[in-house]
Image: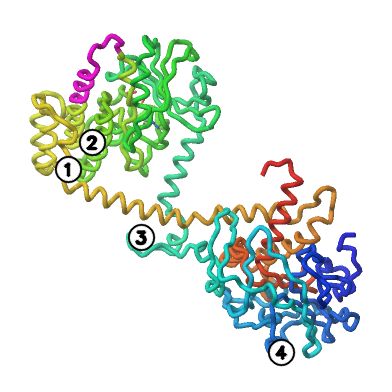
Amino acid sequence: MDPMFFPPSNGVPSESKLATYMVTPQSPEFIPNNRLSSSSSPNFYSSYSILSNSNNGAGSSTVVGSNGTVVATQQPAPPTALSTVVGKGAVVAGGGGGVGYAVGGNSILAGPLGSSTSAFAVTPNKGRNLLRNESPQSTNTSPRITPQPSPPPITTNIHQENVGGTTYFYPTAANHQLPSSSTVNTTDNSFVHIASSQINLSYTHPGHIYPGPASHVINMQSKVQVSAAFFMQDELRNDILARNEIVNSIDNDCPDIPLEVENYHSLCLLESLPLHPKLPLPSSTYKATHSVTGVKYCLRRLHGFRLQSTKCMQVVDMWKKLQHSNIVQLREVFTTKTFGDNSLVIVYDFHPGSQTLLSKYFTSVPETNGYTDPFAGEARPFSHKSSMHRTSATSLLPENEIWSIIMQLSAGLRAMHQAGLACRTLDPTKIIVTGKRIRYSCVGISDIATFDPNQQNPLTVVNHHQQEDLTALGKLILALACRSLQSVQRDQIQNSIELVSRHYSQDLRNIILCLLNPTARRSVTEIMPMIGARFFVQLDALQTQCDIQEDELAKEMENGRLYRLLVKLGCINERPELNLDVTWSETGDRYMLKLFRDYLFHTVTEDGRPWLNQSHIVQCLNKLDAGTMEKVQLMSRDEQSVLVVTYAELKHCLDQAFSELVAASDGTV
Ligand SMILES: Nc1ncnc2c1ncn2[C@@H]1O[C@H](COP(=O)(O)OP(=O)(O)OP(=O)(O)O)[C@@H](O)[C@H]1O
């Protein structure tokens, strides 16, 4: 028979759902003798400390004391402690009035109670709100850390003591000794080792609480706001949102694009131009979704291209292996007729929110928070059609910014050259900027498109292309320094160098001259000494950025863990039925969790107003997840009964109930 239907012989009003948890004289768990063993206590109920109103059942049972208060606890409790407890006289579950809790959480425990170090200083003290200060457990007791998911067996040898008319029950101490240290399993399956000396913390998991930003991070910000200390910086949030929006957008007004191309679908045109000088054929760029993984990629299509020889796949493999933070990774290459012609498609990683170097530095279009929408406006910003109008931007760039670009471009180029490859598309339209990151975006295309299977000496050709890369890099730096593409035209170069000499350092001038020198055989490593100590500035900036981002990560890290806990609670609480059992959610472990949910979210102030306190919720969830031995008082909705349970027991209930749900489900969690 479901315990729901037991007669309420324990003094709990029959309408109280807590009756299902209350102890009856018949209930083996609370018979204070030694007959019981852990095996006779299949339920976990015996471990709950229960307090009920005696007025409704006074004298009717040996369990209920004459003043109507019953306290049972599993804490070993010397009598001296008991008298202290009773002396406080705070344990009143008023059956009639329903008021009744001037709670000192301490006062309901039979045990060597110290003053609780509750994290909640402000304690609403009426009705279900009594449940503050809920950690009556002292460090001096021997709390038991419950390794989860299964709690240790609970000894049901119970000692009974009547003090001042109140009968207390508590188990003998046999197996309630605190191990010297324990391991607690948390929701994210990480195991946290807890030394017993740490138990006196209101959390046994101090690592699960974000302590606020580190001093070296908070002092980096000029204007520190309280909210900034606990929430992600607006700028970073907006950046991520903008990128997500770009990734998720389905913005395809071009009806000619096929629905699916090989393993990719949802193609979305990024840019399409008839001809680019660096590419021998018309090309188009798309964002596309991989059909199997759902990952977004950037597809570059060469129109009307026939692959002459599969030998070029060797060079494709070389590019595929080349990984560098300043190179957009080439993933695969395939030919297709899906577009209605013979097309070659080169698949790259997709970096949302990117713009070309041309668009960022050679146009006078105002910036929008580092992001431009490539689809906005009538003329696409980097179109060659309009590039001549955009080649002269307004002001000169700060030298630091130019050096940052030089370092990133030379780093990427060095990786390519060391791998025996050449970029061959070192062009402001084929370099993309994502935030502060610069990447070569079109590597390998020229090698494939102009592949000559009859080439006798490929190494010489690569050397030649590498030298061309260095010249192109010199031109690009000069153009950036002058903010003008025309500055690198033959008749302008002299004037441009003079401009650099006037406005920038000697090193910048030297690096340009070195790279533009056609007579010398140059290597990308030669420019390192010219970068010199600026390298350290760049390194410092990057490390500072890492510090800030790591701190942002620390803020957000715990959210996922608490979310999973809430999902479990949400799936269990108020579930109308499970396996046709309509009482499931109202009985057993689930009832305990329901009261805990009320305690978490529905606490009210003395005058009945909702008491909304996020820190209360977060702290309680953390304790639940850690399964601490701290006790919490849960009150039934009719305010007639109070249960005292440890978070460890609640965690056990949660795991148990959720396992039942999983077992009854279709297997997908
Ligand atoms: N890997 C990538 N991830 C995300 N966006 C990219 C990537 N590669 C290029 N883009 C973006 O796609 C758009 C089109 O790129 P594309 O290389 O076709 O530039 P373009 O200005 O059209 O050059 P061209 O004049 O040679 O056609 C640009 O906004 C560029 O920033």
Quick one: label 4, few (<14), some, or many (20+) residues within 10 Å? some
Residue 384, x across and y down, in percent: 30, 23
Please report contact status of discs 4 and 2: CB closer than 8 Å, yes or no: no
Quarter occupied by residue 311 = top left
Q: Earlier in the sequence, mark 4 or mark 1?
A: 4
Query: Does residue 479 sit above or below 311 in this rendering?
Result: below
Mark 3 → mark 2, Cα distance in angstroms: 30 Å
Look at mark 4 in the image and give the residue it sits on. Answer: 83
Label 4 vs label 3, nearer the camera: 4
Please report contact status of discs 4 and 1: CB closer than 8 Å, yes or no: no
Quick one: label 3, few (<14), some, or many (20+) residues within 10 Å? some
Look at mark 1 in the image and give the residue it sits on. Answer: 531
Label 3 vs label 1, nearer the camera: 1
Quick one: label 1, few (<14), some, or many (20+) residues within 10 Å? some
Residue 261, x across and y down, in percent: 51, 20
Number of labels in the image equals: 4
Secondary element type, mark 1: helix
Q: Earlier in the sequence, mark 3 or mark 2?
A: 3
Quick check: which quadrant has ligand 1? top left
Query: Which stretch appears magenta?
Result: 452-468
Q: Amino acid at mark 2?
A: Ser
Secondary element type, mark 4: helix
Look at mark 2 in the image and give the residue it sits on. Answer: 410
Q: Amino acid at mark 3?
A: Val
Q: At x 84% / y 86%, what residue is drawn?
A: 66
Q: Is residue 102 visible?
A: no
Query: Does residue 404 sit above or below 573 in this rendering?
Result: above
Please report contact status of discs 2 and 1: CB closer than 8 Å, yes or no: yes
Q: Earlier in the sequence, mark 4 or mark 3?
A: 4
Q: At x 36% / y 65%, what residue is drawn?
A: 215
Q: At x 39% / y 25%, what residue is drawn?
A: 271
Q: Amino acid at mark 4?
A: Ser
